[in-house]
Image (spheres, grey):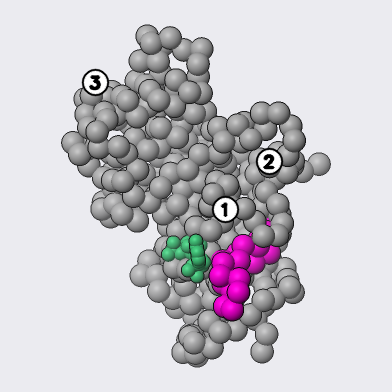
Amino acid sequence: MTETPILALDNVSKVFGKTGNPVYAARSVSFALNAGRTLALVGESGSGKTTCARLIMREYQPDQGQLLFRGQPVGGSAVGSLSAYRRAVQMIFQDPFSALNPAHTVQYHLERPLRLHQKELDAARRRVAIAELLERVKLDPAIVAAKFPHELSGGQRQRISIARALAVGPEVIVADEPTSMLDVSVRLGILNLLNEMKRSLGLALLYITHDIATARYVAEDIIVMYAGQIVEWGPTESVLTDPQHPYTRLLLSAVPDPDVRFAQSSYNAELADVENIRRLSAVPQANVHEVGPGHFIRPIAG
Ligand SMILES: Nc1ncnc2c1ncn2[C@@H]1O[C@H](COP(=O)(O)OP(=O)(O)OP(=O)(O)O)[C@@H](O)[C@H]1O
């Protein structure tokens, strides 16, 4: 028997600018997030990744399809179901500079969610909990708790954002480009921290990125999106080492990572025709082919 995912998008579509020139930001998108696993959602700018995150955070309502939490539609009639969902699903944003309020200390940022979501803690136990949260994200409470955001580096701020998300006791974390605004030198540290959170707390992670090469550091499974549509998905290793969709190959061809093998000359002729690949990849495609164990593509027509 397979375990029920914590969270799932079930055939979800979201359309903007419906009259005249509709933009399908998400087109029949389905995926599931499971405890202790990371799913990477990759694609270039405008492919629909953030729309998926916003649908999960309930900032957008789907035009079609539904969001399932532990197998049940989110926003159903059950009393408390929405508040349980809001607590269970937390987000880490791309910009750790604007995610924190410059007028408040680190202590304040962590105390607030604890007050809201762990009401049983008195002031002394909250202080202990804050210290534990900071240690969890590898920061020294004695040094950082009293600091203001501007006194921290970008990497430290992102660690505070992660600690704040953890303060709520989440089951799912949606991380939208969590390292793209950080120095290259601290990116891996943040990805390693997310990995550790996943393992030690059994979190389900959705890792959103335009940088397909980083997916291999964090994600067991990967989804490649283009024009609101999932074009290829499966185990990360299989998709990255044996990409089957021309658009995935195109994305990988832009990766200067020597670990990602992509020098196969047979792809080169295909990649010369970039515009054609994009055009054909954007065509809605219901057909699905399994190209390896658990590895699927929506083949392009033509
Ligand atoms: N609120 C909105 N109103 C109108 N169009 C929108 C809105 N949000 C997104 N879109 C459009 O939907 C498409 C998908 O956008 P989305 O932000 O989800 O892409 P993305 O892959 O996250 O890109 P990026 O990496 O740049 O954030 C784009 O064409 C975008 O212009």
Residue 126 badge: none
Q: Which residues are magenta?
A: 12-30
Separation of disc 2 and disc 3 at Cα? 41 Å
Per the image, the residue denoted by label 1 is 60
Question: Which secondary structure type mostly characterizes the magenta part of the structure?
Answer: strand
The reply to whether residue 163 is in sight is: yes
Helix, strand or loop at disc 1? Answer: loop
Q: Looking at the image, which is closer to me, 188 or 208?
A: 208
Residue lying farthest to the right in this orientation:
1
Per the image, the residue denoted by label 3 is 142
The spot of residue 34 in percent (x, y) is 63, 43
Residue lying farthest to the left in this orientation:
151
Separation of disc 1 and disc 2 at Cα? 13 Å
Q: Are marks 1 and 2 in contact (CB under 8 Å)?
A: no
Q: Is residue 255 above or below residue 163?
A: below
Per the image, the residue denoted by label 2 is 75
